[in-house]
Image: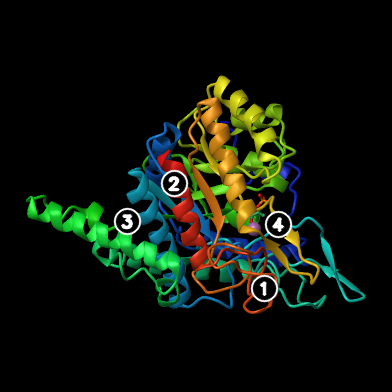
Amino acid sequence: MATWQPSSWREFPAAQQPDWPSRELADEVVDEVRSQPPLVFAGEARRLREALAQVAVGKAFCLQAGDCAESFHEHSAIAIRERLKVILQMSAVMTYAASVPVVRMGRMAGQFMKPRSSPTEKIGDLEIPSFRGHMVNSEEETAEARIPDPTRMLRAYNQAASTLNLLRAFTKGGFADLSQVHVWNQEFVAAAPEGRRYEQIAGEIDRALAFMAACGVDMHNSALHQVDIWTCHEGLLLDYEEALTRRDSLTGDWYDCSAHMLWIGERTRQPDGAHAEFFSGVHNPIGVKLGPAATSEQVLELCQRLNPEKIPGRLTLITRMGAKQVEQKLPPILTAVRDAGHPVVWICDPMHANTFTTESGRKTRRFTDIMTEIEGFFAAHAAEGTWPGGVHLEITGGDVTECLGGGEKLSEEKLEEAYQTLCDPRLNARQSLDLAFHLAELMRR
Ligand code: PEP
Ligand code: CO
């Protein structure tokens, strides 16, 4: 460990990295990013680690949600605010219904690169390189648009900076004030059954606040007026992550200052690979995705590699087994990690193993499969005596039609109406709120 450097990963096999046409230009851009200020501060990452340590011991719950792939085309204040509203609504429902604090992490301000199962895709008769997220190439369906362009790293940095700036303004400047609980209900949601159910809870929160004030409780407490929304993304593009890795002046430790929390994806979690090497040396809280092929041995090796000192809150395991496999695949991993004494946070990603393509060619997910995986996750933890620490979701604040079902019973034909995602299908605002109500019921049990 003494020899670890932000660039040590370069000696290890790095999966899913773009083949920049000019390494020289890529190095210039990396230098430029390196000369920019950090996006987050080490002390914030430590605070998040402490919050996650509370999740690890069963005293809090975690909501990790946001876009599958953030877009360079969609960067309005409105889009950011609407997504934030859904996260605030969901966490209000969960906190209120289950009386458990919720740690909120947004897949925001940095979620610009995607791992792909195949390096190319077929468009008609043409085979072109796959879209890898706006930090790397364009989603346009031409071979030229798919050529990796390293200058996109700088644009991603700038967009992340301004997104984070607005997030901080909203969450610290009054928008996330509990007295605004009604404002978070968007018009198109408010008219729907989920929205009405939310209004009821919002009304109860109002009354609880009024009651506390009448009792003489000091209502200036910042917990009522500000919230923390931590940022996170998949730490996939190591050129970019390395460039934002800085040594903390207080502790001398290295932190990846591109986000508060970062995770390693299912396709890049090899214990002897470049991603494990890179993240073993930064001190942020980190996560690892675990799909149905993960074995207990691999998981224990990753725990050892990424958190040898067993620091609570340092490591989150994000399981994504699929609705059909969760019951069978998850329990052995839970017991192995529990018995080895690793204090991990367990989070369920019910999205990524439940994706399928409809006959008309739309990638989608069923709300029922998503709920089935979450229920299987809770059941497995109940059986093993471990804490089901949270969920990891792909959502948007918009009125999109990308996932099937939910309270609005979104049908396959409807997918054509507002299918807008750059990559994976996301829950819309109503489906997200619907999910929060179901989740709150599971949490209360
Ligand atoms: C993702 O989170 O968008 C993703 C690609 O997940 P996974 O690594 O689990 O496939
Ligand atoms: Co995704």
Q: Callout 2, which amino acid?
A: Glu
Q: CA distance from mark 4 to mark 3?
A: 32 Å
* Viewer-nearest of discs 2 and 3: 2
Percent position of residue 370, x then y:
61, 52
Return the mark for residue 275. none
Crowding around mark 1 (Cα neighbors within 10 Å: few <14, some 14 to 19, many 20+) is many
Q: CA distance from mark 1 to mark 2?
A: 28 Å
* Placement of 407 over or under 288, stated as above or below: below
* Viewer-nearest of discs 1 and 4: 1
* Viewer-nearest of discs 4 and 3: 4
Earlier in the chain: of badge 2 and badge 4, it is 4
Give the camera-side residue of 320 and 201.
201
Q: Are marks 2 and 4 in contact (CB under 8 Å)?
A: no
Q: Are marks 1 and 3 in contact (CB under 8 Å)?
A: no
Q: CA distance from mark 1 to mark 4?
A: 14 Å
Crowding around mark 3 (Cα neighbors within 10 Å: few <14, some 14 to 19, many 20+) is many
* Placement of 28 over or under 41, stated as above or below: below
Earlier in the chain: of badge 1 and badge 4, it is 4
Q: Callout 3, which amino acid?
A: Val
Residue linked to disc 4: 355
Residue linked to disc 2: 441
